[in-house]
Image: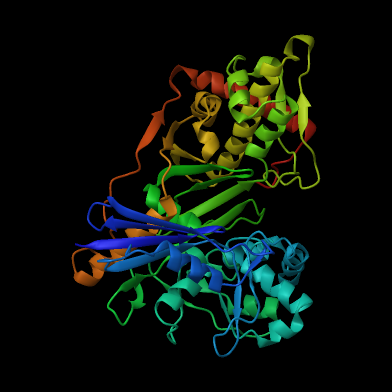
Amino acid sequence: MGIVAGLDSSSGSTRIVVCDADTGAVLRQGYAPHPVEAKSTEADPQVWLLSLGEAAAGGLLEGVQAIGVSAQQHGMIPLDAHGSVVRPALLGNDKRAQVAAADLVDALGGRQAWAEAVGSVPTAPQPVAKLRWLARDEPESAQRTAAVMQPHDWLVWQLLGRPARRTTDRGAASGTGYWSAVTGSYRPDLVELALGHHAALPEVLGPSEAAGTTPEGLLISAGTGETMAAAFGLGVAVGDAVVSLGASGSVMAVHHEGLADSSGLITSFADATGMHLPVVHTLNAVRALRGTADLLGTDLDGLSELALKSSPGSYGLVLLPYLEGERTPQLPHTAGTLSGLRRESMKPEHLARAAFEGMLCSLADAMDVLRARGVEVRRVFLLGAAAELPAVQAAAPAIFGTQVVVPQPAEYAALGAARQAAWALGVAQGTLPPHSPPAWQGAAAQVLEPGDELAVGQAVRQQYGATRDQIHPGAFGGA
């Protein structure tokens, strides 16, 4: 069918993969960091274009017939009536809109009203909260704002030469706070509620639709957000969950319908295939491991070695890893807790094991929030550098109670963008149906089974749950 490319413009860099459109085999790759800026919470969108140009240098895109774009989520780019950027883009890690998000919750009548409207409750990262912040803190910029885009939308628009038509996709739109994955439509009244006036929004394309074609004949697919692109690149499907181990953590799963959740624990995203991607976040994952490693005077590898000298259950030690407060369960002002101290348990290896078990049990709690809403989880993909730690791999299958897949490191968001480009190209050429993406080979991975350790994992979770419920009774009352 040809050659396609996927580019991922993340928070710090641009990565490009060029792939065979039929098989997904990577033919060549490019990389460039974004130019360093003073503010990590804001960015001039032009730096993304500069990084893109550098990553594509040296004829990287020669022979490419279609490009897909993945980009960091929750960035908000306000444009004036002429399409010029009103102010630097507000990025997803900008926390200044926390108060604005709370104001919006009250303004619409509470969490339930928002869950029913768009499938999620406003949080600081979402563009809807950023619009409210802009209206309150930079009213002149807000008044000049005539249109709103996100990073992936803006990059696609630039690649197409800034046409009159502006587009996005279901995945990126579902993170805005003013588009519903349940109904598949915008709520422009929520934009007005936040900004104070109407603003133009990009057209939402279907998964296999093209955003357009450049004058040179290069097809640009719809593109999507980084999370959705990574899931598509991994090849996850119904029955799969993806657990991401960063400083904080997340659990997302492919589901056949959008989930409205008034508790605010579930964010109802759409995926890049026409399905849904509900996500539950935790504030503490690898940061709990790093904190424990610092306490014990070692690093993550050393902590893993120590943990494997202990045994499941950590001799009764339980670490509730709520070091930064917690989002799941909703305990924003709490602290972490170490419980079960006895003379025989007061050893470095048991504390190390408790840190791993606490992190994994906390993520299993997040997974149970999804399961309680009917989301099927038969297999768990484990992502992040910490997924390679032997202590994680030893404990995760039993604690999650299912098969665990640890994919080899790869540029999954860029691969997902490339796969989408191949899909749009195939539809345009008449070689692929609009409802069936190209069947690329799945990610190379290590597969771990719970085996005989399943009962042991259940016992560890029971010990953890009893401690959690004793210290924070009713913590999951809204789940």
Which residue is at 72% across, 14% downward? 347
Q: Residue 88 at what x, y percent from top left? A: 64, 74
Which residue is at 77% across, 48% downward? 332
**Nearer to us in this view, 446 or 50:** 50
Residue that lies at the very extreme toward the bottom in this rendered image: 82
Q: Quadrant of residue 114?
A: bottom right
Q: Residue 196 at what x, y percent from top left? A: 70, 82
Q: Residue 281 at what x, y percent from top left? A: 61, 48
Measured along the vertical axis of the image, is residue 383 above or below residue 47? above
Measured along the vertical axis of the image, is residue 338 above or below residue 475? above
Q: Is residue 205 left or right of residue 338?
A: left
Residue that lies at the very extreme toward the top in this rendered image: 344
Measured along the vertical axis of the image, is residue 335 above or below residue 101? above
Q: Residue 3 at what x, y percent from top left? A: 25, 61
Q: How many marks?
A: 0
Residue that lies at the very extreme toward the front in this rendered image: 58
Regarding residue 264, the answer to whether it shows in the image is yes
Instruction: Specify the color scheme.
Output: rainbow
Regarding residue 270, the answer to whether it shows in the image is no
Which residue is at 60% across, 52% downward? 266
Q: Is residue 121 left or right of residue 425?
A: right
Quarter the N terminus occupies:
bottom left
Q: Quadrant of residue 37?
A: bottom right
Measured along the vertical axis of the image, is residue 443 above or below residue 222? above
Q: Is residue 251 left or right of residue 465?
A: left
Q: Quadrant of residue 148?
A: bottom right
Which residue is at 81% across, 46% downward? 333
**Nearer to us in this view, 73 or 362:** 73
